[in-house]
Image (cartoon, rainbow, N blue to C red):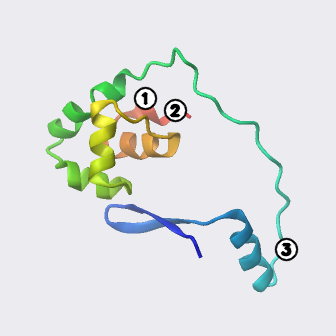
Amino acid sequence: MDIQIISRNGEPEYAVLPWDQYQALLKAAGQQQPTHTPSPPVHAAPDRDLRPLADLRQLREAKGLAIETLARTVGISPSYLGLIESGERQPDAAIRRSLAWELGVAGWRDES
């Protein structure tokens, strides 16, 4: 099985697995399988203000968090967080929400 574990505060919080594997687990458990209605794709607006990400390193340091600590709490590698902080990568909405939660930045929570 291809399962991704997402942790918060060092404890597993979510398990993410491919849809077909989820369906197989439901079938094996004798559960009714929910129908899947595809959602329209979400595209980021090109003019979206990504300014909070530009301040990510300063926010993290102001909280006294080491890059390794914040990264592991959010469920990503320290090297990936470094790429986000340097502007080389743009995280998806789930990572943004996790970063917002951990750093206490309410404004990021609404960005999806």
Q: CA distance from mark 2 to mark 3?
A: 33 Å
Quarter of the C terminus within the rendering: top right
Q: Which residue is mark 2?
A: 110
**Three-letter code for the amino acid on which mark 3 is drawn:** Gln
Please tell me which of labels 1 and 3 falls first in the chain: 3
Q: Residue at x 33, y 30 (%)?
A: 87
Query: Secondary structure beneath disc 1?
Result: helix
Q: CA distance from mark 1 to mark 3?
A: 38 Å
Q: Residues within 10 Å of mark 3 (few under 14, many from 20)?
A: few
Q: Residue at x 66, y 33 (%)?
A: 42
Residue 107, numbered label: 1
Quarter of the N terminus within the rendering: bottom right
Q: Are marks 1 and 3 in contact (CB under 8 Å)?
A: no
- Residue 62 visible: yes
Please tell me which of labels 2 and 3 falls first in the chain: 3
Q: Which residue is mark 3?
A: 32
**Which quarter of the figure has residue 54?**
top left
- Relative to residue 8, is residue 33 drawn left or right? right
Q: Residue at x 37, y 43 (%)?
A: 99
- Relative to residue 96, is residue 61 drawn left or right? left
Q: CA distance from mark 2 to mark 1?
A: 6 Å
Q: Position of residue 16 (x, y in %)?
A: 57, 64
- Residue 29 visible: no
**Which quarter of the figure has residue 88?**
top left
Q: Position of residue 63 (x, y in %)?
A: 18, 41
Q: Residues within 10 Å of mark 2 (few under 14, many from 20)?
A: few
Q: Residues within 10 Å of mark 1 (few under 14, many from 20)?
A: few
Q: Are marks 2 and 1 in contact (CB under 8 Å)?
A: yes
Residue 57, numbered label: none
In terms of depth relative to the viewer, which is nearer, 89 or 52?
A: 89
**Three-letter code for the amino acid on which mark 2 is drawn:** Asp
* Residue, far front: 88
